[in-house]
Amino acid sequence: MRRRRLLGLAAAATTGAAAGCLGGDDATTDGDAGGGPDGANGGADDADWPTGTYADYETTTVTVEGPDGGARGPVTAAIADTRNKRILGLSSAESLPDEGGMLFVHDSPGPLTYVMREMDFGIDIVYVDGDREITSIHNAPEPGPNEDGEDQRYSGSGQYVLEVPYEWTDRHEVAVGDSVRFNI
């Protein structure tokens, strides 16, 4: 299944296809945030992620480990490793499964700010440095009625940003200083 997904991604990349490009991206206003309503999967089955706009994204299992090396929790993450994918973020997702997310990959570590653009649900935003250590965590609630989420800005520093369902980090006791494992 992963091989078919990778082949599909390679085919899309060679034709220059990019689903849902939303615009510019830089080190201070980078990406989009998204996640499952109130940390729930909203009816989505974990085996179905990624779906819809994200169905052809490459995936990786991201595992957070505490200082003792014990696993705190894994997620299946769609990989956003291009400018267009980072800008789209999870804004086209209706929800995330309980153990699903998105891993944003940047070329090098630096200051980043993620926003809740066009989101209808909350997420946790986890900043991870080049050594794959968590540098900051934000519990980003869903935007209020008549808000587009553009005013919800969450700053941090890192080379990677992991977005998971709202309060996932609390449920799994994930903390700044924990390590993150994944293959990309």
Image (cartoon, rainbow, N blue to C red):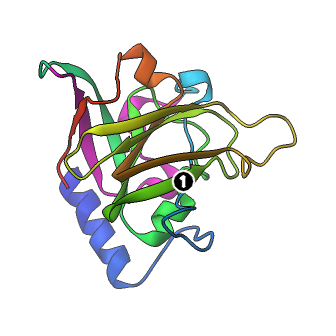
Residue 87, percent across and down? 54, 63
* In this rendering, position of residue 139 left or right of residue 149: left
Residue located farthest toward the right when viewing the structure as drawn: 146
Which residue is at 41% across, 36% downward? 136
Which quadrant of the figure has residue 68? top left
Q: Nearer the viewer, residue 1 or 169?
A: 169
Residue at mark 1: 113
Dot 1, how many residues are within 10 Å of its Cα: few (below 14), some (14-19), or many (20+)? some
Task: Say if the magenta span includes residue 172.
Answer: no
Which residue is at 48% across, 61% downward? 86
State which region is magenta: 44-67
Residue located farthest toward the bottom when viewing the structure as drawn: 15
Which residue is at 30% across, 57% downward? 58
Residue 99, percent across and down? 38, 29
For badge 1, the amino acid type reads Thr
All told, the count of numbered labels is 1
Q: Nearer the viewer, residue 149 or 74?
A: 149
Quadrant location, the C terminus: bottom left
Q: Does residue 99 show up?
A: yes
Q: Nearer the viewer, residue 176 or 144?
A: 176
Which residue is at 77% across, 49% downward? 148
Residue located farthest toward the left when viewing the structure as drawn: 69
Q: Does residue 49 show up?
A: no
Q: Is residue 181 above or below residue 115?
A: above
Residue 83, percent across and down? 45, 71
Which quadrant of the figure has residue 81? bottom left
Q: Under tag 1, what secondary structure?
A: strand
Task: Say if the magenta span includes residue 54.
Answer: yes
